[in-house]
Image (cartoon, rainbow, N blue to C red):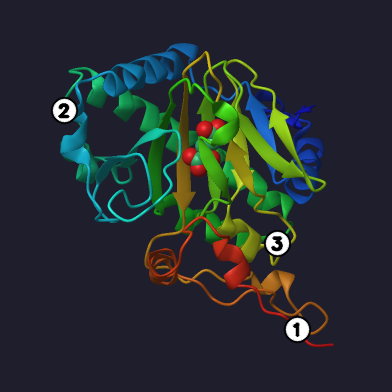
Amino acid sequence: QNLKLPIIDVAELLGPNRSHVLRTIAEACENYGFFQVVNHGMEGDVSRYMIEVCKRFFELPYEERSKYMTSDMSAPVRYGTSFNQSKDNIFCWRDFLKLSAHPLPDYFPYWPSSPSDFRSLAAIYAKETKEMFDLMVKAILESLEIDGEGDKAAEELKEGSQLVVVNCYPPCPQPELTLGMPPHSDYGFVTLLLQDDVEGLQIMYRDEWVTVDPIPGSFVVNVGDHLEIFSNGRYKSVLHRVLVNSTKPRISVASLHSFPLTSVVKPSPKLTDEHNPPQYMDTDFATFLQYISSREPKWKNFLESRKIHHIR
Ligand code: AKG
């Protein structure tokens, strides 16, 4: 079953219809945890070149790619196929390349220098997705109607972290036996996902897995764990997974944006009171790292572990 996600037209968001678009954003974040953006301002060439140069990265000889393999979660560049290759019994049917991207000058020198145009194309892409994030986050926070609290969070998020995750899913001879990525929600505030024209992304909607129709040139935007916590559960960080197929390779590029790694993430005081107590414990990056390094399987939902169960 395929799902058409709510579509947000950024040109319209910036025009006289802003309040109507903000309501659509709020409803999408409440009901789907996902929406797609079009007319977002990124030139088609920037996204096309990014996908194309990433394809070439994954075609490099293994010796070249494996230079970036590491189990150090805080390394500025990580290449791999699994959460922890040396420990995990089951691998996903994907290769990934993770690039820390903000502030760009701090990380850029560590990015792969092969293919020779990789760094420059990925840098343009990272910079433009960061700009798109700043714009989307302003709108998402405005849609929560929390005034100054939203502005404060937007300022903090401007200096937050950005991780660009490139996923390569090769064709799989027996796709029904595996997944490109197991069910997970995204750690972070918001993810902006670019996919090529091959479908594969599925989201949990009304207790069923549904496939998201790729719209060429669009971005899929999804609520991350930080936003669910910050909105005290109003906006949903929804489980998603990736299917693979037997004929076509697929590339996707996820840009994950979070509060700064040192921030403590908590429900906005504007969204809690005596009738609506906080639904989540305060959370920081160290808690997340501890969680993923201490449990098997790693993709179990981190957010569940942060929920407060009030006794009525
Ligand atoms: C992720 O990188 O966290 C994803 O969920 C990727 C989704 C996709 O490949 O469509």
Q: In this view, does 232 lie to the left or right of 166?
A: right
Question: Which of pointers 2 and 1 indicates the residue nearer the eye?
Answer: 2
Within 10 Å of the Cα at label 1, are there few (<14), some (14-19), or many (20+) other Cα atoms? few
Q: Which of 311 and 50 is in front in this view?
A: 311
Residue at image x 32%, y 27%?
A: 122
Location of residue 38 in the rendering, given as x and y in whole percent from the top left corner? 64, 23
Task: Classify mark 2: helix, strand or loop.
Answer: helix
Disc 1 marks which amino acid?
Answer: His
Disc 3 marks which amino acid?
Answer: Ile
Residue corresponding to mark 2 = 64
Mark 1 in CB contact with mark 3 (< 8 angstroms): no
**Measured along the vertical axis of the image, is residue 60 above or below residue 278?**
above
Location of residue 227 in the rendering, given as x and y in whole percent from the top left corner? 61, 57
Task: Classify mark 1: helix, strand or loop.
Answer: loop
Residue at image x 76%, y 80%?
A: 273
Question: Which of pointers 1 and 3 indicates the residue nearer the eye?
Answer: 1
Residue 37: mark: none
Residue corresponding to mark 1 = 310
Indicate which disc, 2 or 3, sits on the residue closer to the N terminus.
Answer: 2
Q: Is residue 148 visible?
A: no
Q: Distance between the residues labelled 2 and 1?
A: 52 Å
Indicate which disc, 2 or 1, sits on the residue closer to the N terminus.
Answer: 2
Within 10 Å of the Cα at label 3, are there few (<14), some (14-19), or many (20+) other Cα atoms? some
Disc 2 marks which amino acid?
Answer: Glu
Q: Nearer the viewer, residue 265 or 250?
A: 250
Q: How far apart are marks 2 and 3 (CA)?
A: 49 Å
Location of residue 154 in the rendering, given as x and y in whole percent from the top left corner? 53, 54
